[in-house]
Amino acid sequence: MKNILIVEDDPDMQEIYKDLIKNGYKIITTKTAAEALKHLKKKHIDLMILDIVLPKKSGDIFFKEIKENPKLRKTKVIVVTVLGDVSDYFQSIDASTICISKPFDKDRLLQAIYKRIND
């Protein structure tokens, strides 16, 4: 079973992700970058879905730190945010990153998950 780490501080959004991605994946949810980092260091994560607006450390800073870390840089990421089109920034750090704006189309998110998991 593939592990998907969802880094999202909004409990309602966490539930939306869990309902949407429930079949065939183990879902791990965290509310902060610090919690997410603990999971990334402890177990294999096949995909991380990352919100940008997070408490304490923003998702964009966390993303950059992950991609600069030799042990974590291969982490596959989908960025989901209310900030609009941020793909240029994230893809300049890791070209394979997929960025999706909130509110998102559920089918588009599922297609992105399938694509990243199977890359």
Image (cartoon, helix red, strand yellow):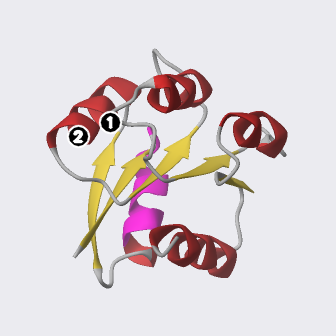
Residue 17 is drawn in which quadrant?
A: bottom left
Q: Secondary structure at mark 2?
A: helix
* Residue 110 seen in the current view: yes
Give the position of the N terminus as an image quadrant: bottom left
Q: Is residue 16 magenta?
A: yes
- Disc 2 designates what residue? 39
Does the residue at mark 1 contact the one at mark 2 (Cβ under 8 Å)?
Answer: yes
- Per the picture, the main secondary structure of the magenta-coloured stretch is helix
Q: Residue at x 43, y 47 (%)?
A: 75
* Residue sitting at the far front: 70
Residue 118 is situated, as x and y percent measured from the top left of the image, at 48, 76
Using the image, determine if residue 53 lies above or below residue 6: above
Q: Name the residue nearer the viewer: 78 or 116.
A: 116
Residue 98 is situated, as x and y percent measured from the top left of the image, at 67, 56
Residues shaded magenta: 9-18
* Residue sitting at the far left: 42
- Is 71 left, or right, of 21 in this rendering? left
